[in-house]
Image (cartoon, rainbow, N blue to C red):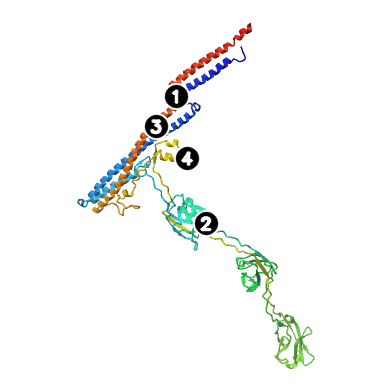
Amino acid sequence: MKIQTNTAANSALGYMKVNAQNTERSIQKLSSGFRINRAADDAAGLAIANQLRADAKTLGQAQKNAAQASAMLQIADGAASTLGNIFDRMRELASQGASANIGGQGSKLQDEWNALYKEADRLITGTKYQGTNVLTSLNGSAATTAAAGTAALSGATAGQTASLAAGGIAASSGATNAANGSYTLSVSGSTMTLTGPGGTTATASTTPSGGKITFASAGIEINTSGSYVAGSAGTAASSGTAGSFTGDITGVTTLPASMSGSNSGYEIRDGAAGALELWTTGGGAAKVGETSGAVTTGAGSATFDNGAVISLSGFTQASAGSAAATGSSSALTANLSSVTNAVQNASENGSYAFVDDGGTGVKLQKGGVDVPGATVANASITSGATLTFGNFSVTLDAGVSSQADLIGQTFTFGGAAAAVAPTASSANNDTFAVSGYSAGSAAVANSLDGATFSVSGMTVTAAAVAAPSILVGTSASQATGTLAQRAAVYDSADSIQLSLGSLDDMDIKNLSSSVNTGAGAAATGASLLTTAGAKDALARLDLAQEKLNTFVGKLGAAQSRVDYASQNVDSMLQNTQAAESSIRDADMAKEMSAFTKNNILQQAAQSMLSQANQGTQGILQLLRG
């Protein structure tokens, strides 16, 4: 016998735990009514039951969808029936008007016709279910292709003919229809701005993509396959090298495009009134520029009218020179009437005296020095005579008759000046050379900058739009594949398209007495005032009735389909719920039997645990001896 480990008690305890756990799970199933209360109960079964429950929810709503669709179609059916009654009455009026017995009562027929048409039009435009017009909106639309509309270009710069003729301006792919109105293009740098109706703007790069400039937000593309010029920024001139300076020239600050070239030589020459001129050197020298006025002494640079700017240092302005000045005589003593000097020479300024030449005449001295060629014979000295002494002409007073009357007489001469020749400026004939120069380029305007155009009737490509549908199935829940593939199943296999067409049709609008526009519009409004007009109205009613009959036929087919779909949904819902029940719901009788078994086993295990614990007490008897 062992006391440390009671194997029998441990075994009984283990079974008691198992029985307690099984009893607890039986209680869960009996109290909840579900066979599966947690994933561990039946993982695969729970997944299937959850999908069936989701399908049942969808089918439950599909059941409601079908009922509501049936009600919506019933409203359309009632309106179409009323419309048929209106057409019947209009036919009676037109038949009456087409007969000669109406006399002059056609206006009364016309009044009722107009009232009936207005009611028919009101029914067509106003019969709605939950906001959906059941006579015009239960249909899809066919695909349409883009139309360029009209886009007339004006205002482009002469010579810049970007391709903007037919097809040159079109609706951009994926955009909304371009607004009708006038548009203006403007370019700043690499950005083109389109200003449209109401001041709306859109921008795009001036660099085309795929031969087009696209203004996505405005819905407009401009084809640039023609002679489109994207424009470019100007480039600065390259100054090259200006060297080999002579004289006052110390550098060249600016070189204009006209002076571009390789190894070209240039020379400064004096111009009129102190201005400077710029000439090419070598054979065939030519003037290329001149200053606008005189360049003053000390000027640091000279700016020429061709744009050249030349730096100078130590510059002195040219002088114009001056003419010789004669001077004048003064301080004449007695017997001398006047003295003049025929030669302009400042060296002859000073004091003069007449002296005896030691012979038979008189000579003229300046400071005791004989004036060359200044001797006159005594015989020439007479009253009032004019005598020549070198460069001087002397006129005697009256009463002078001999040598003695002239000797000792004096005069002073002053102010005489010789002619001064003009001098060149210090830069005259100074030279420099230019090499490696390249002229800059002016900015090139974008050929569409400032262009304007007008747009009307432009549309974009539109995909076909399916008719409204109602969901009446759940087969897509079992589909596989991508999101788009699963959605496509819901849109096709699980939905009914309500494609009834539209009574908003020109054949019905032609019943109006007003003139309509658009495809299929009659040239005149319907009129019962004449027999011919009434017969024309009957023909219009035939076409209108055909449209209504076509609509009613599709309406009846849709009602029948919805009825059958509703029956199928009812059956699918019932069977789906039954399938879920077979997996998820508990078999109460079976679970009660299992609970009873587990409860008895748990009680038996408790009893055996008690017996096993008592068995070890026999050891005490052995210990007592």
Residue 392 spot, x, y in % from top left: 72, 86
Query: What separation in Å lies between label 4 and label 3 (alpha carbons)?
Result: 25 Å
Q: Do the residues labelled 2 and 4 touch (CB within 8 Å)?
A: no
Residue 508 spot, x, y in % from top left: 31, 48
Binning the other alpha carbons within 10 Å of mark 1 as few (below 14), some (14 to 19) or many (20 upward) gives some
Q: Are marks 2 and 3 in contact (CB under 8 Å)?
A: no
Query: What separation in Å lies between label 2 and label 4 (alpha carbons)?
Result: 45 Å
Q: Name the residue under label 2.
A: 187
Query: What separation in Å lies between label 2 and label 1 (alpha carbons)?
Result: 78 Å
Q: Do the residues labelled 4 and 1 touch (CB within 8 Å)?
A: no
Query: What separation in Å lies between label 2 and label 3 (alpha carbons)?
Result: 66 Å
Binning the other alpha carbons within 10 Å of mark 2 as few (below 14), some (14 to 19) or many (20 upward) gives many
116 lies above or below 226: above
Q: Name the residue under label 3.
A: 573
Q: Name the residue under label 4.
A: 483
What SS does tag 1 mark?
Answer: loop
Q: Nearer the viewer, residue 543 or 484?
A: 484
Q: Name the residue under label 1.
A: 586
Residue 525 spot, x, y in % from top left: 30, 52
